[in-house]
Image (tube, rainbow, N blue to C red):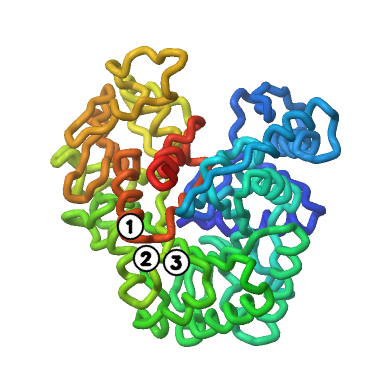
Amino acid sequence: MNIFFLNLVYSLTLLYLSNDIYSFWGKNIVNNNGINEVWAVPIENTILNKNQQIISLSDNQHPTEVVMDDIQKTDGLEEENDYKEDYDEILFDTSNPCSKNIIAYYTEWRAAEILPSQLPYDKLTHINYAFGVIDSKSFEVVGYNSRILSNVITYAHQQNVKVLLSVGGWSGSEYFTKMTSTEENMDAFVESVRSTIFNLELDGIDIDWEYPGRYSNNNNPDYANDTPNYLILLKKLRSALGDSILITAAVSITPFEKNGRVLNDLSEFAEYFDFVNIMAYDFSGSWSSIISHHESFEKPEKGHDFSFKSSVENWVQRGFPPEKLVIGVGAYGRSWISNTKMNLGLFQTFDNTVYDREDDYHPKWFNYCQQDKLDHSSTWRYKYIYKYILSLREDRGEREENDDPFNYSLHESNGIIQYDCWLRVWDSIAQAPYLFNTKFNNFISYDDPQSLKIKMNYIQENGYAGVMMWELDGDNDDWILINTMNNCLCH
């Protein structure tokens, strides 16, 4: 975990207090899921606007200033007629009648890469806007950019998509314990949530407390009282917000704890939540002892005892109703450098002295098989797995003008597919894919459409509420992952 998370929370808070000026004066930003990522600048000193046009930046201008200017000029209602026509087209393109929830997080620090107008609203039912944080003194919700959030709400509501403000996150959960420690503090938070929801016309709040009664990145848990106090907070929120406003949460694969023990009965919590989103990923990573899957459907043979299935079973067995359980997937992979080529890296020890040298967006990865130097990125967003690895397959054929953006049947196999020096391998026990680099021993655990279809079928067959994805910027331009989930759950 990265100490720069704290800088992100601090920066977001400053942005809120500075009249919503949305600008970071450094390219590298660490998101709340532990992934070190970057503002996208396609060419040095340029940026893409909403129409994918390259705009030159002045010497002292930051990409987000251009994006904010672009958003303000194009996403408002009082604009020139030519834009109003485009806006009306979106207005009447009302949305998908899906019986399951398809939820995705939109991260504010990605606004330079994906504008609110570019999101796949027709494939979603809910968007969780990340993140607001809790002020340490007033206990109000702060730290988000209201202008960007308002634009997301406007576009989403035109297509019957609900928007929730997610509060907390991996680096933003520091003050939950303090806020829930007294009735007065909770009342201040609840009033702030209530006024924020009604002023911005939000559809609800998503509580991302990581984690009540358990140590995490920068929280200060009260092991005995966090979870009981959480229940009190939920009662207050429901009383203040009524039944029409959504109250959801991002939760661990391990249900709520008190004094280090998991609660046996979660039914009372379920009364106040509309649903919870189980973060069924990050089962393994740089903190593990051996390489294993980070979001597999079934438990792997070695490495850990977690899985997509066991994650939700943990909650059902403790009285949480299946129809209120949304199961999460990550639109990114986790990577290691194996110490050996045995078993194509799976369940092997790894070199924990090798740190990130290149982020996943770096074009160096496209020619990685022709390089002599080992490079490492600990996380890979799916869009770059697609761009820099899956596109290397020589027999995928020429893309016809009217073809699907990506014929993924060419990339689905229960065996091994070669992409130059990369091998895509299917683990039939864990029901998950992984990539292995035969030249440098890079190993990437991730989800793809083949594994997602298995997960979506499981959701349908067992009556669960739907799927959540962290995060939209992980998917590629054709929304391969989002489309897979939508096709399985909504058609």
Mark 3, Cα crowd under 10 Å, few <14 / some 14-19 / many 20+, is many
Q: Residue at x 73, y 34 (%)?
A: 87
Distance of mark 2 from mark 1, alpha carbons? Answer: 9 Å
Q: Which quadrant would the N terminus be assigned to in this image?
A: bottom left
**Picture layout, residue 42 above or below residue 255:** above
> Who is closer to the viewer here, 397 or 43?
397
> Who is closer to the viewer here, 453 or 259?
453
Circle 2 or circle 1, nearest the eye:
2
Numbered mark located on residue 324 in the image: 3
Distance of mark 1 from mark 3, alpha carbons? Answer: 23 Å
Q: Position of residue 267 (x, y in %)?
A: 42, 80
Give the residue number, with chain letter if any, for mark 1. 283
Give the residue number, with chain letter if any, for mark 2. 253
Q: Position of residue 2 (x, y in %)?
A: 49, 55
Outermost residue, left side: 342
**Picture layout, residue 307 above or below residue 443:** below
Mark positioned earlier in the residue sequence (2 or 1): 2
Circle 1 or circle 3, nearest the eye:
3
For label 3, the SS is: helix
**Picture layout, residue 76 above or below residue 203:** above
Q: Position of residue 314 (x, y in %)?
A: 32, 70
Q: Find out whether the residues at labels 2 and 1 contact each other: C-beta distance under 8 Å.
A: yes
